[in-house]
C-alpha cells in the first residue's frame, strides 16, 4: 500500500498499521466483529516475511504471543469481547513477565455471548485488570479507522518502551466502518535494548522470562517495580482531546463511537442555543483525570455518554469528586445511545447546574 | 573410557526441590546431558510447565520461559515460529499436558510444530498434593478419587502417544520409563532422537517418560520403581509409537 489516502475499514487499517510498525508475529482466533483484521494478517504477514497462525483458541493465541514476545519480536493478537475474556489469562502472565504484546479488542455486546453489535462494555475489564492480580495495561481508545491505525502503530512503541502489554480498545463500529486512512509513522522513541529476550544463551548468562516469584518478599518487590512503572506511564502517557469545552454549558465525556455520536449531538445542540463541549479520553488507562478535575473545578457539569450501562462514568466521578454535577447516558447490550436522549439529558443537567 | 560421574555442563548445582525418589531429577539430568553433549546450550530455549517442574529453569543453565498451565505448547509455538533455528522444547507433566493443556498439545502436534515435548507421566498431580490425573490408572486411589478411579464416572487413563500418533504431522513419539538403568539409557536415546527429529526439521516430537511419584503413590522409592514395571507398563506400553525414520507404521 502507498502512503496516500485509501478507503479501508478500521479492522484492516489496524492490521496494516501493525505490519508497518514492524509486527511480524500475529496469532489470532476468529470472532465477529474483528474477522477482517485476522484475515488481513493471514494475507499480510507472509508478504512481509512474518508469521500468521490461526490458533486453536484465544487461550492458545495469547500464549503464542507470550512465547513470541519473549524472543523479542513485535507481536500482536486481536479479538472481540468474549475472546478477550479468554485472553485475560495470558494477558495477566504477560503483564507479570513484562512482555510487550499488543492486544486489540473490537468490542461487541455482552455479557456472555451477547451479540455482535458495537459496544463499550469491556471498559472495566480493560482498565481495571480483567485478568487476575495487580497489574495495568496501557489502554488506547480510537474513535475511527484513522485513529485505529495510528494508535495500533504507536501501541508497539509504547509496549517496547515500557515493556508492557498495550490494549487498543475499539468497538465494532470503529472496526467495521470504512473511512479514508493515511498510514503515518508513529512517533519513534529511543527504545531500550531487549537485553532480557530469549534467543539462546550463546556467550552469555541464561535468561528467564517468567511471572513466578515464589521467594519471600520477591513478588512484593516485583510489584513495587511494576507500580513505579505504572506511575511513570500515568505521568507521561495520559492523552485526551478537548473540543469546544471552554465556555461550554456542559462537557460531554465520551470515547470511541460514543464520542462521534456526541459530536453530532453538540452540533444539533448549537441550533437550540446550547453549547456542548467534548472531553474525549484517548487513553482510558491512564485515565485523563487531571483534565476532568480541572474542568470540574471550573464548575463545568459533565455528561458521560457510553455504550454501556455506566463504566467510565465511575472514573469521571472519581476525578470530579463532587465538584460538579455528573450525568450519564448509556446503553447496554450493543448500539449507541440516541442523540435525542443525549440532548434531553444535557438540557436537564444544564438546568440543574 | 572415563567412568566418573560428572554433572552435565548445563545442569546447575542448585539442589532440586523434588521429593525423595521423584523421577523429575533423572529426567532433568537426561535433558541436560543431551543438550550438553550436542553443544546446544547457546541455541536452546525451554518452556517450563505449571506443576511440580514449575521451576525446572532453576536447574538448567540455558534460556527458559514459563507458560500458563497447559499453554506450554502454545508458548513453545510462539518461540519456535519466531526463532525457527533454535532448539525448543517443552517439559510438561500429565496434568499440564493431558488435562488443561490437551487442546494446545493436540493442535501443536497437528500443525507439526517443529519442537520437542518431554512429557513426564507419573499418573498423579504432585504439586497440588496428589489428585487424579488424566493418566491415573483405573482403581488407583488419589486425593480426588478416594475410593479409586471409577471408569464409569472418571473415565480411563489417556494414552497420549497413541492419541497423537493418529495425527499425520507427528514425526516421533515414544514412551520410556525412568525406573531402571537400562530404561534410563533408553529414555536418553529417545530424547536424543527427538532432538535430532527437530534439528532435521521433521516435525513434532514427544517423549513420554513413566516417572515415579513415591509421595502420592504412597510407596517407598523402591516400591515406586517396581510399580512402574508391574502396573504402569501394562497400561502404558513402552517403546517407539511412531518414528519418521522407520517409515509408515
Image (cartoon, grey):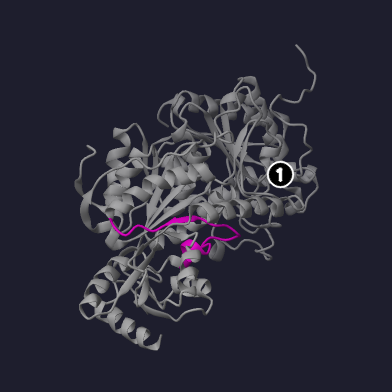
Packing grade of label 1 (10 A; few <14, some 14-19, many >=20) is many
Under tag 1, what secondary structure? loop
Q: Quadrant of residue A209?
A: top right
Q: Nearer the viewer, residue A214 or B230?
A: A214
What residue is shown with label 1?
B212
Furthest-top residue in this view: B1
Q: Quadrant of residue A339?
A: bottom left
Q: Nearer the viewer, residue A102 or B70?
A: A102
Which x, y percent locates residue B215?
Answer: 76, 51
Q: Quadrant of residue B136?
A: bottom right
Which x, y percent locates residue B227?
Answer: 71, 45
> Is residue A285 positioned above or below B17 on the image?
below
Q: Nearer the viewer, residue B24 or B179?
A: B24
Give the extent of the magenta segment. A124-144
Which x, y percent locates residue A176?
Answer: 25, 58
Furthest-front residue in this view: A247
> Is residue A244 positioned above or below A190 on the image?
below
* Residue B69 seen from this side: no
State whether the magenta stretch is mostly helix, strand or loop. Answer: loop
> Is residue B103 positioned above or below B229 on the image?
below
Which x, y percent locates residue B212?
Answer: 71, 44
The residue located at (44%, 66%) in the rendering is A123
- Whether residue B211 sits left or right of residue A81 in the image: it is right
* Residue B127 seen from this side: yes
- Whether residue B111 sits left or right of residue B178 in the image: it is left
Q: Disc 1: which chain?
A: B
Q: Nearer the viewer, residue A157 or B159?
A: A157
Amino acid at each position: 500500500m502507498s502512503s496516500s489516502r485509501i478507503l479501508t475499514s478500521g479492522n484492516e487499517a489496524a492490521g496494516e498499521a501493525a505490519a508497518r510498525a514492524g509486527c511480524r508475529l500475529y496469532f489470532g482466533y476468529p470472532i465477529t466483529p474483528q474477522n477482517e483484521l485476522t484475515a488481513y494478517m493471514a494475507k499480510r504477514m507472509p508478504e512481509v516475511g512474518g508469521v500468521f497462525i490461526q490458533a486453536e483458541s484465544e487461550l492458545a493465541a495469547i500464549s503464542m504471543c507470550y512465547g513470541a514476545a519473549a524472543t523479542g519480536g513485535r507481536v500482536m493478537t486481536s479479538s472481540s469481547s468474549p475472546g478477550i475474556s479468554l485472553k485475560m489469562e495470558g494477558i495477566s502472565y504477560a503483564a507479570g513477565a513484562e512482555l510487550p504484546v499488543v492486544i486489540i479488542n473490537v468490542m461487541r455486546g455482552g455479557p456472555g455471548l451477547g451479540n455482535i453489535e458495537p459496544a463499550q462494555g469491556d471498559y472495566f475489564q480493560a482498565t481495571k485488570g480483567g485478568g487476575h492480580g495487580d497489574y495495568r495495561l496501557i489502554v488506547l481508545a480510537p474513535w475511527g479507522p484513522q485513529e485505529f491505525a495510528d494508535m495500533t502503530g504507536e501501541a508497539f512503541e509504547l509496549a517496547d518502551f515500557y515493556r508492557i502489554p498495550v490494549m487498543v480498545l475499539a468497538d465494532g463500529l470503529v472496526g467495521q466502518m470504512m473511512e479514508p486512512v493515511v498510514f503515518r509513522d508513529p512517533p519513534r522513541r529511543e527504545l531500550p535494548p531487549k537485553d532480557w529476550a530469549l534467543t539462546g544463551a550463546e556467550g552469555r548468562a541464561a535468561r528467564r522470562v517468567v511471572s513466578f516469584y515464589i521467594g519471600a518478599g520477591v513478588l512484593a518487590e516485583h510489584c513495587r517495580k511494576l507500580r513505579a512503572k505504572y506511575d511513570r506511564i500515568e505521568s507521561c502517557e495520559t492523552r485526551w482531546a478537548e473540543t469546544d469545552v471552554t465556555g461550554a454549558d456542559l462537557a460531554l465525556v465520551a470515547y470511541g463511537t460514543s464520542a462521534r455520536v456526541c459530536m453530532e449531538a453538540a452540533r444539533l445542540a448549537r441550533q437550540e442555543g446550547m453549547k456542548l463541549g467534548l472531553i474525549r479520553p484517548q487513553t482510558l488507562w491512564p485515565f485523563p483525570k487531571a483534565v476532568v478535575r480541572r474542568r470540574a473545578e471550573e464548575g463545568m457539569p459533565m455528561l458521560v455518554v457510553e455504550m454501556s450501562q455506566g463504566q467510565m462514568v465511575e472514573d469521571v466521578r472519581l476525578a470530579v469528586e463532587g465538584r460538579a454535577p455528573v450525568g450519564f447516558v448509556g446503553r447496554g447490550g450493543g448500539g449507541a445511545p440516541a442523540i435525542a436522549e443525549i440532548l434531553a439529558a444535557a438540557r436537564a443537567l444544564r438546568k440543574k447546574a | 573410557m572415563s567412568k566418573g560421574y560428572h554433572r552435565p555442563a548445563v545442569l546447575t548445582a542448585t539442589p532440586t526441590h523434588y521429593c525423595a525418589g521423584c523421577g523429575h531429577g533423572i529426567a532433568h539430568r537426561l535433558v541436560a546431558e543431551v543438550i550438553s553433549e550436542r553443544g546446544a546450550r547457546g541455541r536452546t530455549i525451554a518452556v517450563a510447565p505449571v506443576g511440580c517442574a514449575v521451576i525446572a529453569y532453576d536447574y538448567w543453565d540455558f534460556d527458559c520461559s514459563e507458560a500458563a498451565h497447559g499453554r506450554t505448547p502454545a508458548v513453545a509455538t510462539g518461540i519456535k515460529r519466531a526463532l525457527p533455528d533454535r532448539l525448543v522444547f517443552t517439559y510438561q507433566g500429565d496434568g499440564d499436558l493431558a488435562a488443561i493443556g490437551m487442546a494446545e498439545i493436540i493442535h501443536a502436534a497437528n500443525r507439526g510444530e517443529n519442537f520437542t515435548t518431554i512429557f513426564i507421566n507419573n499418573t498423579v498431580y504432585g504439586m497440588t498434593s496428589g489428585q487424579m490425573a488424566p493418566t491415573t490408572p483405573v482403581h488407583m486411589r488419589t486425593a480426588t478419587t478416594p475410593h479409586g478411579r471409577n471408569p464409569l464416572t472418571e473415565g480411563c487413563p489417556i494414552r497420549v502417544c497413541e492419541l497423537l500418533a493418529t495425527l499425520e504431522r507427528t514425526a516421533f513419539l515414544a514412551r520410556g520409563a525412568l525406573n531402571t538403568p537400562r530404561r534410563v539409557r533408553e529414555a536418553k536415546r529417545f530424547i536424543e532422537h527427538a532432538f535430532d527429529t527437530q534439528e532435521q526439521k521433521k516435525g513434532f516430537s514427544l517423549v513420554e517418560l513413566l516417572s515415579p511419584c513415591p509421595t502420592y503413590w504412597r510407596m517407598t522409592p523402591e516400591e515406586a520403581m517396581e510399580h512402574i514395571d508391574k502396573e504402569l507398563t501394562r497400561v502404558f506400553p513402552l517403546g517407539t509409537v511412531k518414528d519418521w525414520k522407520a517409515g509408515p507404521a
